Image (cartoon, rainbow, N blue to C red):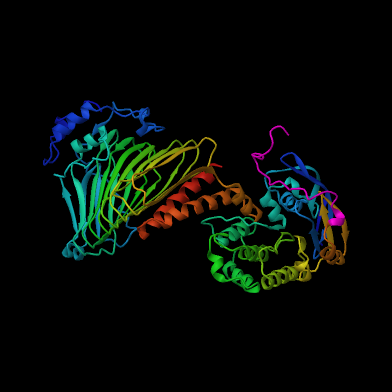
Amino acid sequence: MSTLKISGLRAAVSGKEILKGIDVEIKAGEVHAVMGPNGAGKSTLSHVVMGKPGYEVLGGSVTLDGTELLDLPTWERSQAGLFLAMQYPTEVPGVSLIDVLSSSLAAVEGDGDDLARRLRDEADRIGFDHQFLSRPLNVDLSGGEKKRNETVQLGILEPKFAVLDELDSGLDVDALRLVARRVEAATEESGLGVLVITHYSRLLSELKPDRVHVLAQGRFVASGGPELADELEVSGYGAYVDEGPETEPAATVAGDPFADPLA
Amino acid sequence: MNESFSVEATSGLPGGRDRAAAVEAASLASLPTAESEDWRYSPIGDLESSGWRPVSAPPDDVEIDLFDDIIEHRSATVTVIDGFVTSVDVDPGYAAKGLVVEIVADVAPLELDLAEPTVFDHLHRAFSPAAIRIATPAGLVVEEPVVVVTHAAASESVSFPHLIIESGEGSDISVVERQTSTTAAALSIPVTELTTGAASQLRYVVIQENGTSHWQIGRQLSTIGAQSTLSSGMAVFGSRYARTRTDSRILGRGATANLVAAYYGDNDQVHDFRTFQHHEARDTRSDLLFKGSQDDRSGSIYTGLIHIHPEGANTNAFQTNRNVKLSEDAWAWSVPNLEIENNDVHCSHASTVSPVDGDQRFYLHARGVPPSVADRLIVAGFFDEAIQRLPVVAARAEVQRLVDEKLDRRNEHR
């Protein structure tokens, strides 16, 4: 049984420590939800785990079945079985979805057979219009269409673990249900383990979490069962936030051009 | 240039123009230098002029690829070797309908009232043997493209191809020119003149695949008539240094110029474009999209001007130049400009020079695509927009092949 283990993970952006020690262990088929206020470090966590440039890992480890992912380039993390559904999927002009997925599959086993049919099947499962499959990647897709596009890719690549960074944003209620059910089905069919990052509990009514973690000020300040999500829905994050919400700086390779030079 | 470019050297060339006067004008003009604004950033100063000589006759033993595996169906085929038209083959059906493909020696001098003649223009006037003229009569729609194969064979020589395309009123014509050369050092100075009659369509694509010791200093002059559309595409992949100056004069009311280019340099190649979009009538439109990439130590220069003349009311004019630098040592200069003498216009210009986008890379890497494959997909995707705008559909596959070939070479090196 596969395990994704994050231990003592600390990371900084532009010299500012955002993740101050994250510990979580996700087993195959489990769904862990990470909730928290804006600026808590949720997106940073997803980016650092996937290896996005611009973040500095200060300590800790992320292992998938014992393999240290932090030592691998991003594409090898993906090939090892990690998937990231991005909060803001990037538009890649002139590049088709099928070219990306076939290149990914070809890099290991060359199992690109029947990809077009599988793509149509995956699209049908979440009500994603086939016309979008032939568009250049994410170009001129609405926010909701982009999230469905991410879900189609998750279905094709069949990762062991998926980090879903606000997969619910931009989706209407019906689409949200279809997408959540698709991910839930993967947990049952192929034992997908999920780390789902969200602000709201509505996603979790379809994608049932085994554990819920509250991320605030760079740490998991509380963890519990699914009831914790319901509790947060009522009471908010006030109990877990000492000060006002911190702003989570976006990672820029060149550093923040608006940073105070005297700070 | 040097003493080889003499009046005596023109003696074997057809008459019909005052070659001696042009030789004289060329001898008085000096070679440009990169000091002048016109040639800034270019390696024109490296052009060794001493060894060159004009070609006096085409070699007779040159095998030439007629490009028929790429463009099978065509209305005519013309071959031009070292500036000499060596064969003309017109589909009899189109010939009967009046499609003209002819050799013309007594061509009028270039109308350069918007551009100062250079030494290269004088040399072209003096030493170009003859032009090939492709013309449609009024109303003729030519379904298949005319193919022109222009080849530079002789080494240490300068050739002067001259292509004239004229679309008669209400006619429709497509021309694809493929330029090739041997691996020898040679200089080509081509001139292409495009003239659209009222309400006609003229589509022209030039695919430049010269060898990397080849130099090219070309000029494209267009005059675009009322309600007509000129669509001109350039795909520039070859030559050590290739410069094209395009002067598009949009002269007729309601006329449109669509200008697109894809260019990709590697090793020490330099691709240089200087473009002018002159709006000289009302209700006109021009749309320029030039996209290029530079690898290794190669570079590109783009300088462009949209000029709205006082009579150019209700003009829509756009100019976009985008460059992707694929190596630290590659370089690209991009200088778009506007000169507007009429207030009733919509104009925009944009230019970018940047490496492969980091977010696009991360997205593909996060999907498990290896870095070399990801860059390849992104760069090919970058060119896709320009390739899809090439106005002759039959030419797109070859340009796609050239992009792929450059990308293959890139991956082999890494």
Region in magenta: A238-263
Left or right position of B121 against A107: left
State the quadrant of the C terminus of chain A.
top right
Please, which residue is most extreme toward the front here?
B343
Q: Residue at x 41, y 32 (%)?
A: B41
Rendering coords of residue B164 (x, y %): 23, 49
B131 or B227: nearer the eye? B227
Q: How many labels does the image show?
A: 0
Whether residue A93 is situated above or below residue B50 in the rendered picture: below
Res B287 visible: no
Please, which residue is most extreme toward the left here?
B16
**Predominant secondary structure, magenta span:** loop
Left or right position of B255 against A263: left
Rendering coords of residue A76 (x, y %): 68, 51
Rendering coords of residue A197 (x, y %): 75, 59
Q: Residue at x 13, y 41 (%)?
A: B14
| Magenta-colored stretch includes residue A245 | yes
State the quadrant of the N terminus of chain A.
bottom right
A238 or A22: nearer the eye? A238
